[in-house]
Amino acid sequence: MPRVEPSSYRAPRLLRDGHAQTVFPTLQRRVPEPAYSRRRIDLSDGDFVDADLSPVGARRVVVISHGLEGHSRRPYVLGMARAFNAAGWDVVAWNFRGCSGEPNRLLKFTHSGSSQDLAEVIDAVLACGRFEKLVAVGFSLGGNLTLKYLGERGRDLPRAVVGGVAFSVPTDLRGSAERMGRLENRLYMRRFLSDLRARMAAKAAQFPGRVSLEGYSDIRDFRGFDERYTAPLHGFANADDYWARSSSNAYLGGLRVPALLVNAQDDPFLSEACFPRAQADANPSFHLEAPEHGGHVGFVTLGSDAYWSERRAVEFAEAL
């Protein structure tokens, strides 16, 4: 059965705490930026996303999806890009709508259910005709997109798409939102809401009269934000409808290419349902690895340029 037990990750002694693992890379890690070249990808609904390319002339490519309010130059993306380049893979790290430093054209933004955005990025990457093998890698929200994309398409994936790897994924969006609303996560929640406020302020300026920031300070959690903004702007009835239709747990049974989910047991953002053991037992294409430590997008390795998560992703992709 494709549960990976035990995990090969061993956390440094001083980082055997989920919060420490979550915060340490943000404060301490610096990764040199590869020689990115930017390409704009026009989407079918008239919007666009910007992708950053780091080629090495390979016939295989990894497409990296970042997390909520992230971008292609976050250390965890740069570290993953460097690891795959070093292993002989071209890299495409795409930025979600409005995350590349330029406002996107439409009122909508990339949310946890926007697997169509990832699909169009992958189609654009493969349209050049050079790549024989493509692996999708995602973090957190980007990991949810990765698993949802692979699962909902099942056998209808482009032939070159051979699998995916996802780290620190809220596969159960409702449970994760409730977990984030707890007192111990209030600092993370404040940071997310501050970043999202800046996004909605930009949308309010771009689309006068269609978005309001009045009462934004009353929003305390993801339910409040998703009820007010995410759901109505993207055709969902409410936050619960958005979470139910967008959680990748609902699509894991459809996986027909190998996919690895790595969620740390001490991740402060994840609910118990974000460890879908029954789905791993039932589907030979779905691999679940749950290290004891690792936090949220942590998996820190000291004394090495590459974090364990980067080596693990390359290892899984090479075996496909």
Image (cartoon, helix red, strand yellow):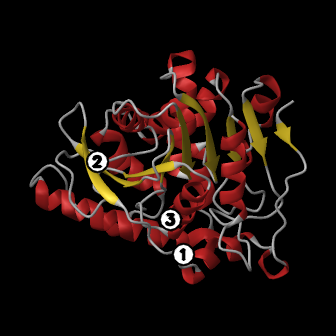
Residue occupied by mark 1: 187
Residue 24 rendering spot, x and y as whole percentages: 64, 78
Task: From the viewer's side, name the closer residue of 308 and 176.
Answer: 308
Q: Sequence-wise, which precedes: disc 2 or disc 1?
A: 2
Numbered mark located on residue 314 in the image? none
Q: Which amino acid lies under the numbered mark 1 shown in the image of this protein?
A: Leu
Quadrant for the N terminus in the image: top right
Nearer mark to the viewer, of 2 and 3: 3
Q: Is residue 217 above or below residue 80?
A: below
Residue occupied by mark 3: 78
Badge 3 element:
helix
Task: From the viewer's side, name the closer residue of 317 and 85.
Answer: 85
Q: Which amino acid lies under the numbered mark 2 shown in the image of this protein?
A: Val
Residue 73 rendering spot, x and y as whole percentages: 42, 66
Left of 74 or right of it: where is 162? right
How far, Cα to Cα, is label 3 from label 1?
25 Å
Q: Residue at x 52, y 58 (%)?
A: 81
Residue occupied by mark 2: 49
Tags 2 and 3 in contact by the CB under 8 Å rule?
Answer: no
Quadrant for the C terminus in the image: top right
Q: Sequence-wise, which precedes: disc 2 or disc 3?
A: 2
Q: Residue at x 84, y 60 (%)?
A: 292
